[in-house]
Image (cartoon, rainbow, N blue to C red):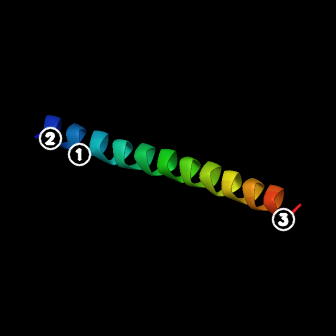
Amino acid sequence: MRNHQGLRRLGWLLLIWLGSVAGMAGVALALKLVMRAVGLAG
């Protein structure tokens, strides 16, 4: 039972890590698109 609880905690950590990585990738992509739009406008 204790091992199962540890696996669940590990799963939550993995979900949180994946979410943060996806968020940072989204921010980087948005910044790149904004820079490209500004470059085209300028």
Please identify the residue farthest to the top as the structure is shown: 3
At x 33% / y 48%, what residue is drawn?
A: 12
Judging by the rendered image, the residue that carries numbered circle 1 is 8
Residue 13 in the image: x percent, y percent? Answer: 37, 43
Rendered position, 25 above or below 37: above
Q: Earlier in the sequence, mark 2 or mark 3?
A: 2
Q: Nearer the viewer, residue 1 or 28?
A: 28
- Looking at the rendering, which quadrant does residue 35 occupy? bottom right
Q: Residue furthest left?
A: 1
Task: Calculate the distance from the C-alpha at mark 2 to the C-alpha at mark 3.
Answer: 55 Å
**Quadrant containing the N terminus in the rendered view:** top left
What's the amino acid at mark 3? Ala
Left or right: residue 24 versus residue 31 is left
Judge depth for marks 2 and 3 and give the one in front. 3
- Secondary structure category for the residue under label 2: helix
How far is disc 3 from disc 1 in space, using C-alphas?
49 Å
Residue 11 figure quarter: top left
Q: Is residue 4 left or right of residue 24?
A: left
Q: Cβ–Cβ below 8 Å for labels 2 and 1?
A: yes
Q: Percent from the top left, x then y, of residue 10?
A: 30, 39
Labelled disc at residue 18: none
| Image position of 1 (left or right of 6) | left
- Give the number of the disc on residue 41: 3
The numbered mark, 3 or 1, whose residue comes first in the sequence reads 1
Seen at 44% across and 43% down, the residue is 17
* Quadrant in the picture for the C terminus: bottom right
Identify the residue position indicated by label 2 in the image: 4
